[in-house]
């Protein structure tokens, strides 16, 4: 889907408005994308910049529709000739940005889970940005604060089949190799919503907690995908397990806790990089990709009450 052209939120004047093509992996009505764009415009701080948005809608559209939307982004590149391209999340890199490695147009990304080398960006003179690195250890520490455990923690982790989760799983395994107090009993990758429900119910007496990570691509009867809010609502109604994730949208919809990846901070760092490129004329090849270090702890008090957990005032 191709969105409209929007000015940045700041007031002011500029001699020549910068054109920025923003290709998002998902949809502009999703809070994660709203937060990244808000942060980007704040970090960019260019009052009259004009932003054109193309949505790939990869969480909900079938692959052919996502590829068609990526082609719309290619057409926008050719017809509109932006001064800079801002891409976020991994699908926008694999379906679009990789076509422009080494091109004269600078690219800045945010919310990317894979390593830059996975896309060939480490060999590119025009692409840099902000990596998304989830706060796995921080989320587990927050969970222990909410529900102290004398023994080691036994957990299950849930992923769907989105390629994004390969990098997440790899980093979690690396973290687990450094600690002996956590054991992943099951790595779940259900194909359907019914399979997800069955496997979650079977876990109730086997683990201490579950990480609800990739929950966007579970098919329902008729081939339609279950909305992630529906998945989380089912958890609240049917699961007795404390659950955690890495994003605030999950806690807002019933997940117990998260040390969240901050979308605004992701976008703000990307916007500052874009400003260095456009205003200070720093070449992208001179700007090393980096992760956003800021995380934010969140707890659902309603979920805690439903699970019978009393949270110490010091934690709150």
Image (cartoon, helix red, strand yellow):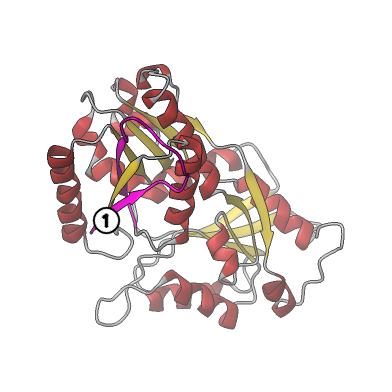
- In the rendered view, does 116 fall on the left or right side of 304? left
- Say which residue appears at 65% left-offset and 50% top-offset: 296
Q: Nearer the viewer, residue 150 or 290?
A: 290
Q: Position of residue 113 (x, y in %)?
A: 43, 42
Q: Residues within 10 Å of mark 1 (few under 14, many from 20)?
A: few
Q: Which residues are magenta?
A: 1-26
- Tell me if residue 195 is in the magenta stretch: no
Asked whether residue 6 is drawn in magenta, I would say: yes
- Identify the residue at image location x=67%, y=64%: 208
Number of marks in picture: 1
User: In the depicted view, which residue is nearer to us: 240 or 71?
Assistant: 71
Please state the horizontal and vertical placement of residue 275, each as a whole percent of the image. Answer: 43, 29
Q: For the point 44% across and 72% down, which residue is it? A: 196
Q: Mark 1 sits on what residue?
A: 4
Among the 4 quarters of the image, the one containing residue 3: bottom left
Quadrant, the N terminus:
bottom left
Q: Secondary structure at mark 1?
A: strand
Q: Would you place residue 200 above or below residue 140 in this image?
A: below
Query: Where residue 52 sits in the image (x, y, percent)?
Result: 28, 48
Give the left or right position of residue 17, taking residue 147 as reference. Answer: left
Q: Which residue is rendered at x = 35% and y = 65% of the image? A: 217
């Amino acid at each position: 889907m191709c969105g409209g052209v929007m000015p940045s939120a700041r007031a002011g004047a500029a001699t020549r408005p910068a054109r920025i093509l923003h290709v998002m992996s998902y949809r502009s009505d999703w809070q994660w994308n709203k937060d990244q764009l808000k942060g980007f415009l704040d970090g960019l701080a260019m009052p009259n910049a004009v932003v054109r948005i193309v949505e790939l809608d990869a969480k909900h559209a079938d692959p052919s529709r996502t590829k068609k939307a990526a082609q719309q982004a290619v057409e926008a590149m050719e017809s509109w000739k932006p001064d800079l391209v801002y891409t976020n999340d991994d699908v926008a890199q694999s379906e679009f940005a990789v076509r422009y490695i080494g091109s004269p147009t600078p690219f800045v990304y945010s919310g990317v889970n894979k390593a830059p080398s996975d896309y060939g960006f480490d060999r590119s003179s025009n692409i840099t940005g902000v990596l998304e690195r989830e706060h796995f250890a921080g989320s587990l520490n927050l969970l222990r604060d909410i529900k102290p455990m004398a023994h080691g923690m036994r957990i299950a982790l849930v992923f769907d089949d989105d390629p994004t989760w390969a990098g997440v799983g790899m980093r979690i395994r690396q973290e687990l190799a450094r600690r002996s107090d956590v054991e992943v009993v099951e790595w779940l990758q259900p194909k359907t919503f019914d399979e997800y429900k069955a496997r979650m119910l079977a876990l109730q007496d086997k683990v201490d907690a579950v990480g609800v990570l990739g929950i966007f691509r579970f098919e329902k009867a008729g081939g339609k995908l279950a909305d992630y809010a529906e998945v989380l609502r089912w958890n609240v109604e049917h699961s007795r397990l404390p659950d955690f994730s890495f994003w605030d949208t999950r806690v807002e919809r019933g997940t117990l806790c998260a040390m969240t990846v901050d979308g605004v901070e992701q976008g703000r760092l990307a916007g500052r990089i874009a400003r260095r490129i456009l205003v200070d004329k720093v070449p992208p090849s001179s700007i090393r990709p980096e992760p956003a270090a800021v995380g934010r702890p969140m707890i659902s008090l309603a979920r805690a009450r439903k699970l019978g957990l009393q949270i110490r005032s010091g934690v709150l």
